[in-house]
Image (cartoon, rainbow, N blue to C red):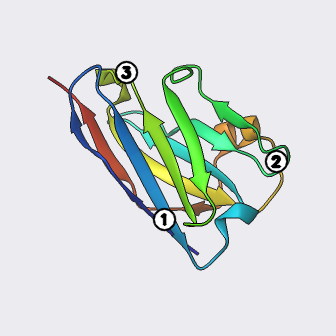
Amino acid sequence: VQLQASGGGLVQPGGSLRLSCAASGFILADYAIGWFRQAPGKEREGVSTISSSDGGAYYADSVKGRFTISRDNAKNTMYLQMNSLTPEDTAVYYCAADPAYYTGSYYLDYGMDYWGKGTLVTVSS
């Protein structure tokens, strides 16, 4: 099981970025998926998840209305579209996947089993 995140970089406040995470060694469509982030000096936090139990998308309150999680099953890839970025969104972003059927909110709080290496997003003018 491998996950490879990409798409991070430097963006100005108010800008947008799309993160991608390619999966290999397993079928991503069969897994719950999620994005998490860790800012300097802070604990990891759940950003957004899609559970296998109901297929619904869940978002942290801090990103609701600005971020969108999605996946392309044909490409075995997940995405995180991030709009209206602020300096508070600066963090290393990690993609993750899990074979179980917990709810999306559970995964936001407790994380997932499989993790990719992070990609750094810096929001600064």
Q: Is residue 74 left or right of residue 106?
A: left
Q: CA distance from mark 3 to mark 1?
A: 24 Å
Q: Quadrant of the C terminus?
A: top left
Q: CA distance from mark 2 to mark 1?
A: 22 Å
Judging by the rendered image, the residue that carries numbered circle 3 is 84
Q: Considering depth in this image, is 36 or 51 the residue closer to the camera?
A: 51
Judging by the rendered image, the residue that carries numbered circle 2 is 102
Q: Position of residue 86 (x, y in %)?
A: 32, 21
Q: Is residue 99 left or right of residue 67?
A: right
Q: Identify which residue is drawn at 64% across, 48% down.
A: 111
Q: Identify which residue is drawn at 51% across, 24% down.
A: 63
Mark 1 residue element: strand
Give the number of the disc on residue 58.
Answer: none
Residue 4 placement: quadrant: bottom left
91 in relation to 102, above or below: above
Give the amino acid type for the residue marked by disc 1 in the picture: Ala
Q: Position of residue 33 (x, y in %)?
A: 64, 52
Local crowd at mark 3 within 10 Å, few (<14), some, or many (≥20)?
Answer: some
Residue 38 placement: quadrant: top left
Q: Considering depth in this image, is 94 or 9 the residue closer to the camera?
A: 9
Mark sitting earlier along the chain (2/1): 1
Give the number of the disc on residue 22.
Answer: 1
Task: Give yes or no for contact between labels 2 and 1 (Cβ–Cβ under 8 Å).
Answer: no
Give the amino acid type for the residue marked by disc 2 in the picture: Tyr
120 in relation to 45, above or below: below
Q: Position of residue 15 (x, y in %)?
A: 29, 26
Give the amino acid type for the residue marked by disc 3 in the picture: Ser
Q: Position of residue 7 (x, y in %)?
A: 33, 51
Mark 2 residue element: loop
Q: Quadrant of the N terminus?
A: bottom right
Mark 3 residue element: loop
Local crowd at mark 1 within 10 Å, few (<14), some, or many (≥20)?
Answer: some
